[in-house]
Image: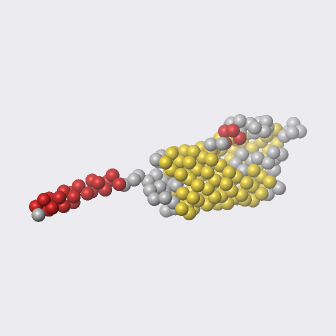
Amino acid sequence: MKIITIFFIIMLITSPLWAQDDIQSVNKNALKITFLSFITGSSKLTYERVTFPKQSFEFTVGIIGVGFDSYQVNPSGGLIRAAYKFNLFQPAGSELSGLYVKPEYAWSFFSYDSSDGKRNYSSMQTIMGCIGYQHEIKNLVLDFYVGAGAGWGDLVEFQYHHGFIERFGWLTLTFSAKVGFSF
């Protein structure tokens, strides 16, 4: 009986120490770059912050003209994106992972060389609905999404606004692959 009592006393004393090993640090922030943006003529940096359980806010800034100029139009300008994510399915132990939907606002503003040799300016805005999946592996964050919406503003000849594609003068399409780290 003494051995059983000593065993339970040892278990009671050491169980708080074991519980600390089971606690995972849950990151609530992420800093990401848009993986494909450099090959499409811009560079984008995104900050994400968990606001409530299964919800987060995302803000992106970009410089248009930094990267490979695939259309050979010498673009120069910027872009801003803001989104609010709603996680539909979130695995335990990660505030940033899971399948999500997000309404998103995007605004791109830049000048470029047109086919007639003039320097043109475009300012286009859009509101889109996106669906995606984000996965956190330790501190590595991978984010993939697609979306569509309605846009307004100045159209460009090549229909690419460095963050979304415009079709038919109003339909906007987007997709992205982002990689970053959580903290």
Q: Is residue 87 left or right of residue 130?
A: left
Total marks placed: 0
Instruction: Provide residue 14's location: percent of width, then percent of height.
Output: 23, 55
**Image side of residue 129 versus residue 96, left or right:** right
Q: Residue at left 86%, top 39%?
A: 115
Q: Nearer the viewer, residue 152 or 91?
A: 91
- Residue at point 51%, 50% (across, down): 136
- Does residue 125 appear in the picture of this structure? no
In the visual, does 120 lie left or right of 16?
right
Q: Is residue 45 left or right of residue 182?
A: right
Q: Position of residue 15 (x, y in %)?
A: 26, 57
The residue under the point 78% across, 39% down is 71
Q: Residue 141 at x, y = what percent?
A: 53, 48
Answer above or below: position of 136 versus 74. Answer: below
Q: Residue furthest right?
A: 116
**Which coloring applies here?**
secondary structure
What is the x, y in percent for residue 131?
63, 58
| Residue occupying the far left of the picture | 2
Q: Is residue 3 visible?
A: yes
Image height check: is 7 above or below 122?
Answer: below
Residue at left offset 56%, top offset 56%: 57
> Above or below — where is 127 with respect to 33?
below
The quarter in which the N terminus is drawn is bottom left
